[in-house]
Image (tube, helix red, strand yellow):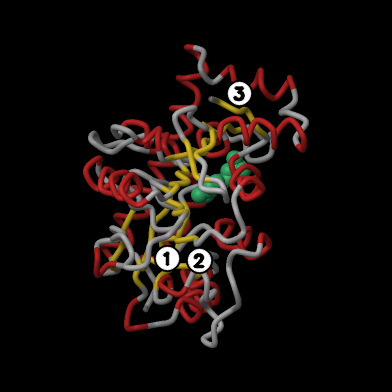
Amino acid sequence: EIFISDGAKSDIGNIGDILSMQNRVAVTDPVYPVYIDTNVMGGRAGNIAKDGQHWDNIIYIPCTSENNFIPEPPSVRPDIIYLCYPNNPTGTTLSKNELKKWVNYALENETLILFDSAYEAYIHDEGIPHSIYEIKDAKRVAIEFRSFSKTAGFTGLRCGYTVVPKELKLYDTSKKRININRLWNRRQTTKFNGASYIVQRAAEAIYSPVGKIQIQESIDYYMRNASLLKDCLQKVGLQIYGGDNAPYIWVKTPNELSSWKFFDRLLCECHIVGTPGVGFGPSGEGYFRLTAFGRYEDTIESISRIQNWKL
Ligand SMILES: *Cc1c(COP(=O)(O)O)cnc(C)c1O
């Protein structure tokens, strides 16, 4: 049920190979762009809407400060829903009960959940699921993508794994239930040559006693950056989200500034680069993502610049 790969992004894109082009896809908005763009390439997104921001065959579920970044099931039933928690870009999480609602929705509506847990290792608070399979019966509806990139600095080395439970059965075009695990196995053996042995040994090492200590140290290092950044942003009066169980801080731009206007000002006035929220989808407009994945010294330097910033 566990397929080792060269990373979660590849598998998240490749999973479309075994899914019908007729499937209706839903995403939370803002979103990790890979979920949208791979469906554009796969032919499931439809056309770009007149506003230039939405794809007309994709269901967008807005997650903003108004709903506390907690997605509600959409009025139109999707065949596939992508969920990513802890979330990139908002840094927010779902509790066990909130995630359970989605598992139950998927069970009732025959929806496939594609669960991305790339930031699972950054969860600090209790009661936040590290895997969707902590929820009863999730094995019947969910595929989970796991990655060593953020957990253990494998963004360049490349390793991850995807869990495709044998209990997961979906309808084929003739309305027959089929085993997705077998389909994915066929896809991978046909088109993927495996993660290299040396990289797998490196990934294996993170489960050793010393490896566990080392990755926890680097996670703590980044989360210290997150907490320092958070304090600073709050002190200067910005409304922020995330940063407790994820290495990202989602900033509400002040005075209704657009994401890009805020980007320009932060760049030109503080010489700090971040990511405009609108780049992650229309509901990201008016927000901005800051990362804790930097050096401690640089984080401290950014903080002193932000403290002296006349916004
Ligand atoms: C970074 C990231 C990934 C990428 O994982 P790789 O294993 O490096 O391919 C997947 N999902 C999200 C949400 C990410 O932010």
* Residue 245 quadrant: top left
| Within-10-Å neighbours for mark 1: few <14, some 14–19, many 20+ | many
Q: Tell whether 271 sits left or right of 69.
A: right
Spot the residue most to the bottom.
50
Q: Are marks 2 and 1 in contact (CB under 8 Å)?
A: yes
Taking the spot 35% from the left edge, 37% from the top edge, the residue there is 123
Place of residue 86 in the rendered image (x, y in percent of width and height, measured from the top left): 38, 46
SS state under label 2: helix
Per the image, the residue denoted by label 2 is 280
Q: Tell whether 140 sits left or right of 100.
A: right
Viewer-side label of 1, 3: 1
SS state under label 1: strand
Disc 3 beta carbon < 8 A from ligand 1?
no
Taking the spot 42% from the left edge, 34% from the top edge, the residue there is 121
The numbered dot on residue 29 is 1
Place of residue 151 in the rendered image (x, y in percent of width and height, measured from the top left): 50, 34
Query: Is there any visible trace of residue 294 in the rendered image?
Result: no
Spot the residue most to the top.
209
Taking the spot 32% from the left edge, 33% from the top edge, the residue there is 137
Viewer-side label of 2, 1: 1
Per the image, the residue denoted by label 3 is 203
